[in-house]
Amino acid sequence: MSGRWTRFNITSVVLGFAFLYLPIVLLVIFSFNESRLVTVWAGFSTKWYRELFNNQGLINAAWVTLRVAFLSASIATVLGTLAALALVRYTRFNGRTLFTGMVYAPLVMPEVITGLSLLLLFVAIGFDRGFWTVTLAHITFSLCFVAVVVQSRLVNFDMSLEEAAQDLGCPPFQAFYKITLPVILPAVLSGWMLAFTLSLDDLVIASFNSGPGATTLPMKIYSQVRLGVTPEINAVCTILIGIVAIGVLIAAVANKRRAVRRRRDEQTAFDEFA
Amino acid sequence: MKSLGNVRRSYAPWEDPEAKPYIRFDKITKRFGDFIAIQDLSLDVYEREFFSLLGPSGCGKTTLLRMLAGFEEPTSGEIYLDGQPLKGVPPYKRPVNMMFQSYALFPHMSVEANVAFGLRQEGMARADIKERVEQMLKLVKLERFAKRKPHQLSGGQRQRVALARSVAKRPKLLLLDEPLGALDKKLREETQFELMDLQQELGLTFIIVTHDQDEAMTMSDRIAVMDAGVVSQIGTPAEVYEAPNSRYVADFIGSVNLFEGTVAGTANGTVRLAGPDGFDIEVADDRDFATGSQVALAIRPEKITLSRHRPESGNAASGEAWEIAYMGDVTNYIVKLDGGKMVRASTLNRQRSVDNPIGYDEQIWISFAPDGGSLLDE
């Protein structure tokens, strides 16, 4: 790859970024619009943000969403990690291929189907729809994402680490949480983050499985937008974008710093040795 | 590593019929599905012995070690440690420590914490742990690196951390799985002697798995040469080198010339062989071989003498140099005999003179004494 900035390069980069970010930029700009009309600019104002904090409906929805996301991500991380362990460690049990396929199926399953089938299940067993049904539904579909992320890390995990711990007098379960878990923790955390984000922005599955008093933020936004887009919605979305962007930024910076430090350490060890 | 000043004493408990083995493998068989990794293997190792399991990869040597550590259970047979059967005892309850081939250092812990891991697990007092860790790091000369993480160390340093960690609990038996495999040649040779000193100093029993015959020869009191799940020969390095009991062992340890032949007669401790290679061989061996049976004479390259004239006594055949490799201390020859057989010979370059060495394009003789090699019927 030559690092030259040709006219063609610049054009394609600009077009690409415009395609990705123009809608978002517009949304952010109009969240600061004075006017109630979304498409007419009438000067800068933060009044929609103030208004937002007085909109109890939106605040409630945001609160529900955060609780659902936190709870479902946490439980899905535990279950997904266990599934990944089973898939990587016990390579010889009967029906492993079937199990693998079944763990991964929800990755490619249309959300409508997942949502509908869960709804049918809850209705069949007479489970009242509400906070817990949404949470359960989110656990179900985000579990497999966690399993995939953790599994990819576990594949490279040196089993002799756990054996060494046992050899030094550590029973198997302790060996897992003293040695294996800290080593695979970055993958487990990214699995959690992924599950959290998936739950945060899910609309389809939540719509099927939610009930009274458990309206999530995406559902709330969607229902309000059907009555017409207000700058208030733009403000909510801008806040969401801000949170996600900060999260991504922190993760990227932490990663980068870790990589740099590691490279420097290895170089030091090498230099001293030589 | 400074040893405690004691001269090594000769040590041969395996010759004493009264001696009690420290570890006894009793008719061990291990199957993985249809694959037989270990077949009906019995083996004794004595206290304070430096014992090597030597063999090519896949011969079952690592499986044997893992059964001793408790990571695998034998399909049948029993392993005894100090007279106690080990069946059903989980790895974390065995008084045995292992040094892993990959070192298996805990990447998220400092060098110090790695070494202290087993001691903490044991519930040792904090102050005692600190003291023991310092002592161990001093032993492997890594005091300065106590706070480092494993990835901040070189390969040789990691190897020493692994060693320190595995001896920190003062196990009476240390298992080492290819401990020097990842080191370069020079470091490997240094470390070999350090391991031997450490074993002497701590008075441990070592069982080491290796595929490197030089390593096994240098360090061990005894070597078990393994082949496809069975032990082919157990003996001191000199025994397996000078008196191999099979073609496999002769070939695996060092380089060897095998002269296949038919027994033409035995008399007065001498066996005469009629060889297909065009010359008769006399071997000093007081076993009684049936006339006409097929045997092989295994003879090491350094036991073969090269000369320009036929020597007056001994077994001799003529040929010409086919390949000459000057190594400095020795020169290795491959001689093509008149009958077509290739024979390896090596001569020690005792004189500095490089005048007139045996070269290409001349008729030469190989010769060896009747007791220079050993007869193999397996």
Image (spheres, coloured by chain):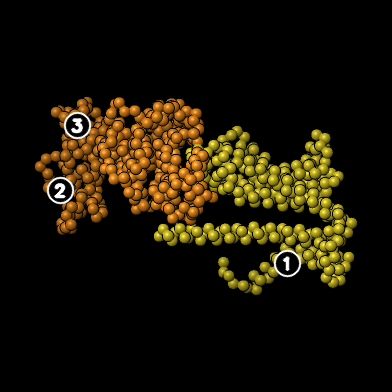
Chain colours: A yellow, B orange
In this view, the residue in front, B38 or B339, is B38
Q: Residues within 10 Å of mark 2 (few under 14, many from 20)?
A: some
**Where residue B324 sits: x, y (%)?**
24, 53
In this rendering, do the residues under marks 3 and 2 share a single chain? yes
Residue B7 can be seen in this image: yes
Q: Does B31 sit left or right of A255 as displayed?
A: left
Identified at 73% across, 67% down, the residue is: A18
Identified at 73% across, 58% down, the residue is: A243
In this view, the residue in front, B113 or B188, is B113
- Subunit of mark 1? A
Q: Where does label 3 land, which residue?
A: B285
Q: Where does label 1 land, which residue?
A: A18
Q: Where does label 2 land, which residue?
A: B307
Give the distance between the C-alpha atoms of the residues marked 1 and 2, in whole angstroms.
87 Å
**Where residue B11 sits: x, y (%)?**
28, 36
| Residue closest to the far bottom | A7
In this view, the residue in front, B274 or A232, is A232
Residue B258 can be seen in this image: no
Q: Residues within 10 Å of mark 3 (few under 14, many from 20)?
A: some
Amino acid at dot 2: Ser
Q: Which quadrant holds residue A46?
A: bottom right
What element does badge 2 sit on? strand
In this rendering, do the residues under marks 1 and 2 share a single chain? no
Q: Is residue A219 above or below residue B274?
A: below
- Subunit of mark 2? B
